[in-house]
Image (tube, grey):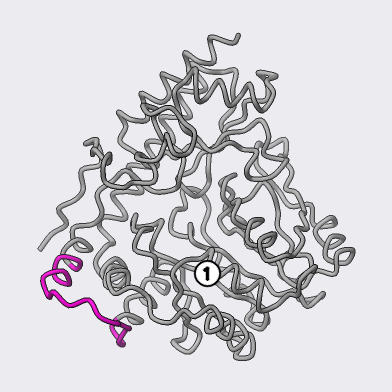
Amino acid sequence: MSEKNLDFDTVIDRKNTNCLKYDFAVERGKPEKILPLWVADMDFRISSYIQEALFCQAEHGIYGYSDTKETYFDAVSSWMSQRHHWKVEKEWLIKTPGIVFALAMAVKAFTEKGDAVLISQPVYYPFSEVIKDNERRVADSTLFLGEDGRYHYNFQDFEDQIIREKVKLFFLCNPHNPVGRVWTREELLTIGEICRKHKVIVVSDEIHSDLVFRGEHQVFVNLKEEFREFTITCTSPSKTFNIAGLQVSNIFIPNEETKKKFQKQIDAAGYSQLNAAGLAACEAAYRYGGEWYEAMMSYVRDNIAYMKSYIDEKIPEIKMTEPEGTYLVWIDFRSLLLSNQELEDLIINKAGLWLDSGAIFGPSGEGFQRVNAACARATLTEALERLKMAVESVL
């Protein structure tokens, strides 16, 4: 049996499917006919092997409480070993309905109300939301945009923040959303040694680990044996295989005491088994989804290169940060000298696009927009043409 769903060019109509990306524009204050390239899911049909696993489960007709057998862990661990040279142990695994849920559980497990949790903005906005919503404070060691066009850590500021704010917990985004950095071994080792020195627990969100175009993803906890003592690694097939709606994540915690504290908060939240469909999809994805994954990566890589060429040639007034990882593209509009409100008007009303405003990723994201490039080339072309006309209208 071979993979069937390798056509990424066909535009699939996702409207009227209760799709967050396409069906909720009006409810979220946007024009009804806006073209959405915001939330991080793909417009591609999933691997036929995942579909078949879900069809098989649906045909069974009973959807009771479910858990996983050895075959599930074998599929997950084989993917991690083959793709990331990381040997995971079954005893480390806790399954959650998502990584944001896991972040919230870590906040509750390892900090008290009023404590500071460290992040590095601009960064995935739920990081700050789960901190604030749990009555903790955000400490931000802001990334800086270097002359090389890449974002970097200021390691002195990173350590200063830990000391000044008495930080116990750090959320690492690896690879980094939205700026697209794939952190190097040297960068991560520096972060790890600082956190080890100050006894800071690191929650490493590695949801985009399979989506690397330049460099190589470094599994943070795998860099040094000592990092196992203070690291929680968050993984999921949801971004890689476009199954975010099935809500399944695999969280790995080697330290037994840390794992117990984390699990206690999940128990206190009243959560136990994941949904049966998500578990079936995860196992099928990691066991049989390699061909689809490779084809998708090739298509998205070409989309990103096409986008870079188009912007450089036809919209030179804006600058695109070419992502080393993720299918999310970070675009700098600051040269247009627009206020946040004026930039939103340009994107929403003049271009008719629904993107993610850079401002939601923190103050350092103001003047930027995040674009989802995991769509059919025709959709991307239409978006770029709309953007070109809108920018020309304000020059």
Q: Residue furthest right?
A: 164
Quadrant position of the N terminus in the picture: bottom left
- Write down the quadrant of residue 24 in the picture: top left
**Which residue matches tag 1?**
234
Above or below, comparing residue 179 to residue 283 in the picture: above
Residue 75 as seen in the image, left or right of residue 62: right
- Provide residue 340's location: percent of width, then percent of height: 67, 28
Mark 1 closeness class: few <14, some 14–19, many ≥20 residues within 10 Å:
many
Magenta run includes residue 181:
no
Q: How many marks?
A: 1
Q: Residue at x 83, y 65 (%)?
A: 162
- Write down the quadrant of residue 62 in the picture: bottom left
- Provide residue 34's location: percent of width, then percent of height: 40, 28
Q: Residue at x 61, y 38 (%)?
A: 358
Judging depth in this view, the residue of 148 and 34 nearest the camera is 34
Q: Residue at x 39, y 65 (%)?
A: 247
- Provide residue 131's location: percent of width, then percent of height: 68, 62
Q: Amino acid at mark 1?
A: Cys
Residue 330 as seen in the image, left or right of residue 238: right
Q: Residue at x 84, y 55 (%)?
A: 157
Secondary element type, mark 1:
strand
- Provide residue 351's location: percent of width, then percent of height: 47, 20
Magenta stretch?
53-71
Judging depth in this view, the residue of 14 and 24 nearest the camera is 24
Quadrant position of the C terminus in the picture: top right
